[in-house]
Amino acid sequence: MTEYLDLLMFAALVVAILSGFPVAFSIAGVAVLFAYFGWMVGVMDISLLGAFGQRVFGLISNQVLIAIPLFVLMGALLEKSRIAEELLDTMGRAFGQLRGGLGISVILVGALLAASTGIVGATVVAMGMIALPTMLRAGYDPRVSAGIVCTAGTLGQIIPPSTLLIILADVMSNAYQQAQYEQGKFAVEALSVGQFFAAALVPGLVLVSLYLAYVLVRGGLRPQDMPPADAGIPKPTRTEILSAIVPPVLLIFAVLGSILGGLATPTEAAAVGAIGALLLSAARAGRNRTLILTGAAALIVLAIAAGIFPVRLQRSDLGPGSYIAGGAYILLAVIGLAGILAALRNVVAERMIHDAATSTMTMTAMIFATILAAGMFSLVFIGLGGEERVAHWLANLPGGATGALLVTMLIVFIMGFFLDFVEISVIVLPLVTPTLILLGHDPIWLGIILAINLQTSFLTPPFGFSLFYLRGAAPEEVTTAHIYRGVLPFIALQAVGVALVWFWPALATWLPKAMF
């Protein structure tokens, strides 16, 4: 019995979560209990728990994760100022009597927001705060609403930029080089993150198309789940559409463009999004609107100009043009700062910042508590022999390239139920990807179908991170059972996406070959 403690721990986690106990405490509590039980029966070295401190330090020192509270603040400000709600409502009315129109709007807006963040937790929470209440008020089934929000948020893992793609690029590049060494090639080729970004772009859009098609079909077959717009509600005018859509979309494109253009890291881009949301929220309050809009325009001009013609004033070889440009940049920065201060005055007076800050603190605490608890769980799982069990399974893969890949994909999918994509990427994939490449699979294509598979781990109950994130952000009327049942059709669509890329490899290989 003791040799199956790792599997029993997973079963206990399922029971604890389904009992309704808070998710983070369920995960950590089950891990601690099984750690000490494993120590008592002699199957686990309890000193392994000492590594948890290193995981905590790694979490709080992770520069990328600093973006989470900033993106949550961005979503909270857009929600409290009703900008995002108006965007979704206007887009839903613009689709007229189309069943599922609001769901389509959520997927499109969610895809744009996911692409701007690249961080699933922040995107799911932001969309949960913005879109879910609007969908429920429109009469949508809670299961459908939760499934759409969760799935739209996870697109940030397959649509570049993505932390998953960055990790996979490193793993697949090392595996590709190892495979070349084993083939006797010493002038080895490497794979870049840019190649994987390019390879994931088309499959990401294919997944978005699958989701949109599902919403349209379900809206036609089960109109009660996604009711059409009330016939008495007029369609928005062109002015209403532009006023609702243009500002948030410009904000999203500013965040995405600053990342893709190489102007900012995801964390810096999150700060851009938070400031942009602050300016948009304050401009709607009315006071000092001209100064706020002027400040926003100055910051936009500053970002574009500094990217095209950067100036380093500390250098001694600058010409007159550089000093003139530097002075202009300083003036633009001062105008932008004045706009930000005026915006802060507005949101404080309207008490928007108070509610947004409270929501941000609550959501951020929930997200980081979940990540910490998941780190404890995976640590104990490894200590109880889960890693050796997985390695044994992988060492006995059936022969043949297709059979080996099928078994690998199935194992990765199952592990996604209870392990984080990072652990799967850095522990499991290095064991199998060199062999799969030697069997003849294209490394970039292989990386993309594994990426879609790993993306599914965010949706698979009971341990999918997106489910936990949305549980913390969802209204009380949306239960855990609603969320779990709502994502099941989208998990099936993920499998369809894998199949499409499997049978048409050009979906993943054409663009990187054309660009590189």
Image (tube, rainbow, N blue to C red):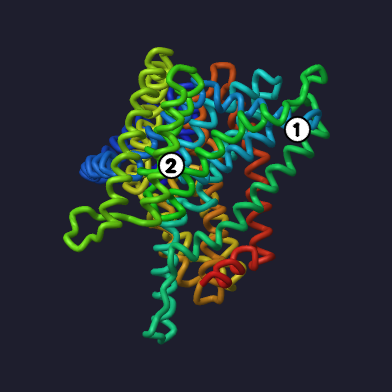
Q: Is residue 230 left or right of residue 240?
A: right
Q: How far apart are marks 1 and 2 (CA)?
A: 31 Å
Viewer-proximal residue among 242 and 499:
242
Residue appearing at x 60%, y 62% in the figure: 406
Residue 407 versus residue 258 in the image, above or below: below
Q: Could you say whether the residue bearing mark 1 is in a helix, strand or loop?
A: loop
Residue type beneath disc 1: Phe
- Residue 303, horizontal then vertical, whole percent: 39, 46
Q: Mark 2 points at which residue?
A: 300
The reply to whether residue 513 is in sight is yes
Q: Give the percent coordinates (x, y) of residue 359.
A: 42, 21
Q: Earlier in the sequence, mark 1 or mark 2?
A: 1
Query: Which residue is more in the foreground, 100 or 294?
Result: 294
Q: Residue at x 54, y 31 (%)?
A: 127
Numbered disc 2: secondary structure: helix
In depth, the one of 307 and 415 nearer the eye is: 307
Report how many numbered discs are placed on residues in the image.
2
Q: Where is residue 397 in the image (x, y as percent from the top left)?
A: 52, 66
Residue lying at 33% horizontally and 42% vertically, measured from the top left: 380
Disc 1 to disc 2: CB gap under 8 Å: no
Mark 2 nearby-residue class (10 Å; few <14, some 14–19, many ≥20): some
Q: Give me the disc on residue 462.
A: none
For the residue marked with disc 2, what is the amino acid?
A: Ile
Q: In this view, does 79 lie to the left or right of 490?
A: left
Q: According to the image, label 1 marks what residue?
A: 95
Decide: is 232 above or below 363: above
Q: Is residue 126 above or below residue 319?
A: above
- The spot of residue 508 in percent (x, y) is 60, 64
